Image: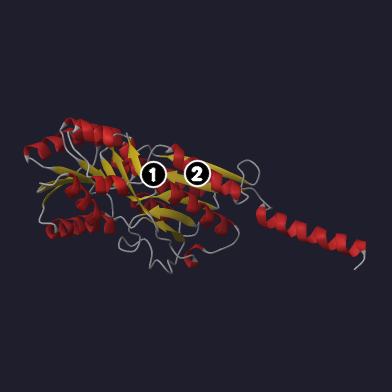
Amino acid sequence: MDRRTFLAGLAVLTAARGADAQPSGKLARIGYLQGVAPVQERDDAFRKRLRELGWIEGQNINIEYRYADGKIDRLPAMAAELVRLNVDLILTSGTTAVRIAREATATIPIVMVTGEPVSTGLVASLARPGGNITGLTHISKDLLGKRFEILKQIVPNLVRVAALVNPTNPGQAVFEAEMESSARALALQLKVLRLQGASELDSAFAAIVEWQAHGLLVLEDVLFTTYRVRIASLAVEHRLPAVFGNTTYVVAGGLASYGANFTDLYIRSAAYVDKILKGAKPGDLPIEQPTTFELAINLKTAKTLGLTIPQSLLLRADEVIQ
């Protein structure tokens, strides 16, 4: 092979590699639809992974950020606006937001991070979701029993457990049925309190105290995530050991959490964005499940509540806040 032929071949190979690492063509546009206020760690991790995949804001991609700040009634208008902007795909999380995005468009691909996409009717199956939706699930229903067990380890004489749920969340019926089953299996009494707004928090905690609950479970929901600092504070104020679904609550002052790593889920969602922007059909991309789960414990909160966390739990914990 002569030098000219070698250099020509090298140029073609380099161009091909560059095209794969840094997609060319029109400026792609992502709709970033979130029911909560910005969660900086997740948002930053998502953008970082996109950059690693060759998608750089302002160069070959724009991200249209829409945050409802816990006001779910704002989501339909935000989703409709993203559709009018003709975004190339929508990234969203939570059953309510995913359903609203699906109602807004049947053609724009949707990448989701949510709990129970099959049982709530969002997709046909995890292996073949079909339609315009794919993404990741944190399989929250299957983790409820584990959270009861953690609460029982922290509170050895646990009998009565209260649970906060949002009845407007399309997945709550599934979650409530699983909670009742898990509570029965552990011989626990369960009191479910259904809240639709932050104004109901004080009365809900008053009812929990009147019932003389020994502990509290808080299900994942946009409402509770938005007001996680206040919920954690109320639990401490009323001396209620509480277990939550992810570490953001523990960072906010909650006692303990067990669930999927949401930051990792957002990092992994970038791979779906990359594949779809390169031509993959969302309905053909299997929905991923988490492979690891995180146990987080706030020792400062435990001390305030006068609790001693078992050494077995501390040794298992992925994050311990002093």
For the residue marked with disc 1, what is the amino acid? Leu
- Residue 199 in sight here: no
Q: Earlier in the sequence, mark 2 or mark 1?
A: 2
| Residue 14 percent across, percent down from the top left | 76, 57
> Residue drawn 43% across and 61% down?
288
User: Is 139 situated above or below 235?
Assistant: below
Q: Mark 2 = which residue?
A: 45
294 on left or right of 7: left
Between 130 and 135, the one nearer to me in the picture: 135
Q: Position of residue 196 (x, y in %)?
A: 23, 42
Query: How many residues crowd around disc 1 within 10 Å: few (fewer than 14), some, or many (20 or more)?
Result: many
Residue that appears at 19% across and 40% down: 241
User: Residue 36 lies in what quarter of the image?
Assistant: top left
Spot occupied by residue 12 in the image (x, y as percentages of width and height):
79, 61
Q: Which mark is residue 75?
A: 1
Q: Which mark is residue 94?
A: none
Which of the image's four quarters has the N terminus?
A: bottom right
